[in-house]
Amino acid sequence: MMYLVFGVIIAFGIGSYLYQRKKDRERTEAMIKVAKTLELPFQEENPNLENACEQVSIFKNDRINKIRNIIPIEGEGTRVELFDLRLTQGSGKHSSNHDQTAYRLTLTNSDYKFPEFRMEPEGFMDTVSKWFGGQDINFERYQKFSNDYRLRGENEKAIRTLFNDELLATLQKRRDGLHVEVSRNSLYIYRFEHHADATTKKVQEYVKRYHSIGMAFKKALEADLVV
């Protein structure tokens, strides 16, 4: 009986591994197809990007297991990367992996510099934290945004300047449950999903959604510099 149970456990483990390998291949194929459609390069791995993401707070609640399937986009004064990351929640037999698609916008023009901040969907623990003096930057004219998100950062004045009316209206309208952070003048964006869709159509939606948000932040920064 013990050997039977042991055999079932091994078979289940092998089956899970093969299933995950299949899903990984499907995801990679979808990302390659999108890159070809958009006439963009494709990188299977990027150690520098993985090292940078390990320093980003919005990813630190979970463990970054792997970063792969990178689509880099070079623009005027910017470098963008759409990529997949596998986050591991919990530990041991209670651990679970979640594949996410994320976005990084890096400003390569030295004239532009984002204030560092962290913006995340506001949950119960965030509310508790605020009871004990935890920071949350709110905007009176955008109560829905302020209720949906917790925004924090050291330079509150610069953050308030960046979050101008146009940017706040855009974010409030979308209500995507976004996680956004600026670290070392790079803007990171992702939306947690328990089961990220691996289809080409969904990947194209990620490109469109995240890039439009990234450009909205860049536009807000440029507006501040013009003023």
Image (spheres, rainbow, N blue to C red):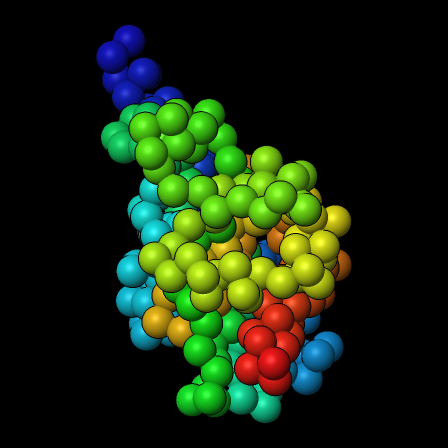
Q: Quadrant of residue 199?
A: bottom right
Q: How many marks?
A: 0
Q: Is residue 143 above or below residue 66?
A: above
Q: Residue at x 35, y 37 (%)?
A: 134
Q: Quadrant of the N terminus?
A: top left
Query: 153 or 26, which lies in front?
Result: 153
Q: Quadrant of the C terminus?
A: bottom right
Of all residues shown, which one is farthest toward the top? 1
Image-based side of 142 in relation to 59, left or right = right
Q: Is residue 222 above or below residue 9?
A: below
Could you say where residue 103 lies in the image, as x and y percent from the top left? Answer: 53, 64
Q: Residue at x 49, y 42 (%)?
A: 150
Q: Residue at x 51, y 36 (%)?
A: 122
Q: Quadrant of residue 71?
A: bottom right
Residue 87 in view: yes
Could you say where residue 163 lies in the image, as x and y percent from the top left? Answer: 58, 60
Query: 216 or 83, which lies in front?
Result: 216
Q: Residue at x 45, y 61 (%)?
A: 157
Q: Is residue 110 above or below residue 102?
A: below
Q: Quadrant of residue 149?
A: top right
Could you say where residue 6 lies in the image, as x and y percent from the top left? Answer: 28, 21
Could you say where residue 80 lies in the image, as x and y percent from the top left? Answer: 53, 76
Query: 72 or 190, which lies in front?
Result: 190
Residue 102 in view: no
Image-based side of 206 in relation to 158, left or right = right
